[in-house]
Image (cartoon, helix red, strand yellow):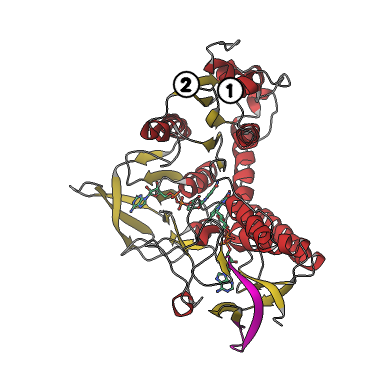
Amino acid sequence: MPTYDLIVIGTGPGGYVCAVRAAQLGMKVAVIEKNPTLGGTCLNVGCMPSKALLHASEMFEEAGHSFAKMGVSVSGPKLDLPAMMKFKQEGIDGNVKGVDFLMKKNKIDVVRGVGRILGTGKVQVTGTDGKAQTLETKNIVIATGSDIARLKGIEIDEKRIVSSTGALSLEKVPQKLLVIGAGVIGLELGSVWRRLGAEVTVVEFLDRILPGMDGEIARQFQRILEKQGFAFKLGSKVTGVEASGKKLAAKVEPAAGGAAESIEAEVVLVCIGRVPYTEGLGLKEAGVAMDNRGRVQIDAHFATTVKGVYAIGDAVAGPMLAHKAEDEGVAVAEILAGQAGHVNYDVIPGVVYTTPEVASVGKTEEELKQAGVAYTVGKFPFTANGRSKVNQTTDGFVKVLADAKNDRVLGVHIIGREAGEMIHEAAVLMEFGGAAEDLARTCHAHPTRSEAIKEAALAVGKRAIHM
Ligand code: FAD
Ligand code: NAI
């Protein structure tokens, strides 16, 4: 008899949540983790530290720029970067301890070391002392996550040329920060360092920021970020970075080719996406197939090409988001328990935690056009929302996209303060197949920013009240 019902390799949000759900369902579970702390990218070098720094740097900027106009007089705030980093670390520690607690509470064995799949039902774990042990299990879930994508010829030293990991722990505020990639990491961490005093230039290969998000939202968001001080070089690529003394010089060329220019920086942040992490897992030898982008190939039930081996999270296809990984973890545990675990990939919210935030769920206008779906649009700006007006935080708008035939909501996109909290009423509505009319007829508390969602839904039927 195998010792375990399930071994999960990796303890990020995909892995640890899968383990907890499996334990709840009565399975004997072990997790394998190669890092000294549990929680994966998300808790250690991703979601959590970035959100701590976004919060702290936002407070710093507010204290310096917004307090006075509300009649709150503070003398010019001073940055204590080591204290801010300590605040970040305390947040990480608290969350990581929380995962340790969940493992104990659910009687999940935590095995430290690098996991390697030897075939159906067998996982080898090599500890830091180099000693290997083989564990036996009925099922294996690969939840090994992702790693930073690298740019050829640009060596990341995590001091001056950094990935997100180095950018979360800079020892001083760079005078000039060059960001390669106008995706989520570039805009979030660019915001952190801009607020703390860096001049931020973002070089993006495409002719727009935030590819994948609704185009109109991305255009307006870019204008907002430019007003905040971001400089963008779109349709451009960095072909090399040279160091001379304390300065770095990045060679930037038009994406389509042409004359290069040199942009000076103290720190360069490379954030051009992430790649699945499957190193040392022994997938090839075990016969686990991968797709052409190095992701573990799975079927609709998370099963790989090897019996009893499943995969979830950043290591498989789909958006590289913690909540997507978590939901897949729950679904696969339920499938293993004979239940009907399922993830609705049409309703996975995405949030950029800048100020204002950008939040989105469902289809973009571009996707609907491409699919040939007839749709109606309702929009409502925060400049016309009472609560936003009194708080003087009126940047952004809500956009509701509904099916022209039956009014069903197909997508909701928001730029605005707290957009990341507001998006969930749209997500719930969409899970229930709701219509714009349902949103519009739902009583919303006044005065709230969420009233802008109701108004945008009313605007689908051309009957917004406050516009
Ligand atoms: P991971 O969290 O990457 O965890 C994988 C774990 O597996 C790691 O602990 C690793 O050490 C371990 N592992 C790998 N191989 C082995 C092995 N062979 N043996 C043992 N252990 C192994 N997503 C959001 O939804 N919201 C955010 O705000 C957000 N912010 C982010 C900010 C940054 C800077 C970054 C980099 C990412 C952010 N993400 C965010 C993305 C999010 O972190 C990932 O989508 C999420 O962590 C994926 O979860 P996972 O469980 O698949 O993998
Ligand atoms: P990303 O995929 O969001 O953005 C990468 C950007 O780099 C794209 O705009 C792309 O066009 C551009 N790019 C690619 N190659 C380039 C090149 N050679 N030169 C210039 N630009 C180039 O990836 P990012 O920002 O690295 O984030 C990685 C993952 O982490 C994302 O998939 C995201 O989902 C996740 N994440 C999520 C967060 C959130 O949910 N708030 C926060 C941070 C990360």
- Quadrant in which the N terminus appears: bottom right
What residue lies at 54% left-to-right and 45% top-to-bottom?
A: 345
Q: What is the spatial separation of the Cα atoms under label 1 and label 2, in whole angstroms?
A: 10 Å
Dominant secondary structure of the magenta stretch?
Answer: strand
What residue lies at 59% left-to-right and 53% top-to-bottom?
A: 322
Percent of width and height locating residue 263? 31, 49
Q: Is residue 60 magenta?
A: no
Residue 388 showing in the rendered view = no
Tag 2 residue: 376
Q: Residues within 10 Å of mark 1 (few under 14, many from 20)?
A: many
Percent of width and height locating residue 334? 68, 58
- Magenta-colored span: 124-143
Contact check, label 1 and label 2, Cβ < 8 Å: yes
113 or 295, which is in the foreground? 295
Which tag, 1 or 2, sits closer to the chain's start?
2
351 or 369, which is in the foreground? 369
Percent of width and height locating residue 228? 48, 34
- Taking 443 as reference, is 280 above or below it? below
Tag 1 residue: 436
Horizontal relation, residue 226 to residue 458: left or right: left
Dividing the image into four quarters, tell me where ligand 1 lies.
bottom right
- Taking 194 as reference, is 95 above or below it? below
Can you tell which quarter of the image residue 101 is in? Answer: bottom right
Horizontal relation, residue 67 to residue 118: left or right: right
> What is the residue that sits farthest to the left in this orientation?
258
